[in-house]
Image (cartoon, rainbow, N blue to C red):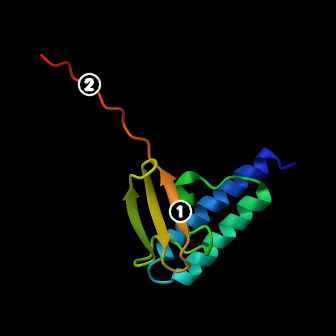
Amino acid sequence: MVSRELKKIALDRIDRLMDFAKKHATERPEIAREAIILAVRIAQKARVRIPRKYKRMFCRKCGTPFWTPNSFTVRVRDRRSTHIVIKCLKCGYIKRIPVKKKPKTHEPHN
């Protein structure tokens, strides 16, 4: 059983490591990748979910940060259900993020 205090410390460290990775992603992508992998391991040990804002910013398979230029492609697809496709150019992993469509409002015809 992991205490609340430990989870709080883990989330704080994950936040710091992700900020560090974001700052150093363009000039030193290897160090940014190591910081991301370390943040993922901290989350696993403390049984904490990585916040969604960070989870979408790196490749799940190889840990490459998506802040670096030429590391990913983004497409919006409308098949099946509307979703965003992010493809890592280092390892080829494809991440799909579902997008909810806004319901169409019908205007009355006069």
Q: Nearer the viewer, residue 60 or 11?
A: 60
| Left or right of residue 25: residue 40 | right
Q: Quadrant of residue 42?
A: bottom right
Q: Position of residue 1 (x, y in %)?
A: 87, 48
Mark 1 lies on residue: 95
Disc 2 residue crowd, few under 14, some 14–19, many 20+, Cα 10 Å: few
Disc 2, SS: loop
Mark 2 lies on residue: 106
Q: Amino acid at mark 2?
A: His
Q: Is residue 105 above or below residue 41?
A: above
- Tell me if label 2 and label 1 are in contact, CB under 8 Å: no
Disc 1 residue crowd, few under 14, some 14–19, many 20+, Cα 10 Å: some
Q: Amino acid at mark 1?
A: Lys
Q: Nearer the viewer, residue 63 or 36?
A: 63
Residue drawn at x 42%, y 49% as measured from the top left? 82
Disc 1, SS: strand
Residue 58 appearing in the image: no
Disc 2 or disc 1, which is closer to the eye?
2
Q: Position of residue 18 (x, y in %)?
A: 57, 65
Q: Position of residue 104 (x, y in %)?
A: 31, 31
Residue 108 appearing in the image: yes
Residue drawn at x 40%, y 79% as measured from the top left? 70
**Label 2 – label 1 distance at C-alpha:** 34 Å
Q: Is residue 78 above or below residue 57?
A: above
Residue drawn at x 52%, y 54% as measured from the top left? 53
Q: Quadrant of residue 21?
A: bottom right
Residue drawn at x 71%, y 57% as measured from the top left? 10
